[in-house]
Image: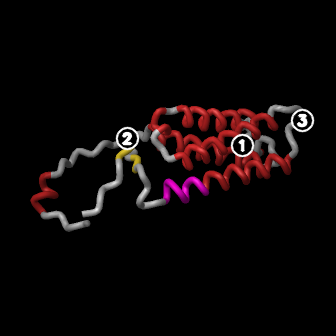
Amino acid sequence: SASLLTAATIDQASPDFPSVTRPNGLVEAMLAIDDTNDRLTAIERAGWKAPADHADLVPVAEAAALADHLRLLAASPEIASRPTSFRDLLAKSQSIAQRLEDQLSTVPSGDPARLSADMQALQATCKECHASARNQRSAPHEVRATTGAATPPPTAP
């Protein structure tokens, strides 16, 4: 249970805070996945081509990056301790991302309706995973951004 800290306890705390905290592990991977997903969403809005305001984006390269992020995350030791439901959703996301890459690597690029359906399926899988794992207060693991270390949740008194 929560309680107020005394002034003495607060005074004993170190005032040295890092100016920058770099996430790692699962947090770092999810940030990279989110950034890549944002770029793919912009590509989708542009008709599965490089957006006029972001001509440096290459659709197949972004889809490949997303598939790679998911593949590397799935192979990481940190994921082995996650619940089967988490790993299953990750595998499903990985499969959809690979399908996006495969479709975008064809010339001409894949069917826009099918690409968009896969993009919606991918986003639905992400939301499902977030609802069941990330957004639960009683999740089996909490990830600290400073170390990326998985720790069990605190036990009730």
Q: Which residue is mark 1?
A: 96
For residue 114, side relative to residue 30 (left or right): right
SS label for mark 2:
loop
Quarter of the image where the N terminus is located: bottom left
- Res 149 label: 2
Given residues 105 and 35, the one toward you in this image is: 105
Quick one: label 3 or label 2, which is nearer the N terminus? Answer: 3
Residue visible at 59% across and 46% down in the picture: 34
Tell me residue 133's x, y (percent).
Answer: 50, 54
Region of the chain picked out in magenta, as a range: 128-135
The amino acid sitting under disc 1 is Ile
The amino acid sitting under disc 2 is Ala
Per the model, the C-alpha gap separating discs 3 and 2 is 44 Å
The amino acid sitting under disc 3 is Pro
- Res 122 label: none
Residue visible at 38% across and 46% down in the picture: 144
Is 134 part of what is drawn in magenta?
Answer: yes
Tell me residue 109's x, y (percent).
Answer: 86, 37
Nearer the observer, disc 3 or disc 2?
Answer: 2
For residue 6, side relative to residue 141 (left or right): left
SS label for mark 1:
helix
- 10 Å neighbourhood of mark 1: few (<14), some, or many (≥20)? many
- 10 Å neighbourhood of mark 2: few (<14), some, or many (≥20)? some
Confirm or deny contact between disc 3 and disc 2 (CB under 8 A). no
Tell me residue 155's x, y (percent).
Answer: 29, 58
SS label for mark 3:
loop
Confirm or deny contact between disc 1 and disc 3 (CB under 8 A). no
Given residues 139 and 101, the one toward you in this image is: 139
Image quadrant of residue 49?
top right
Q: Which residue is mark 3?
A: 108
- 10 Å neighbourhood of mark 3: few (<14), some, or many (≥20)? few
Residue visible at 37% across and 41% down in the picture: 149
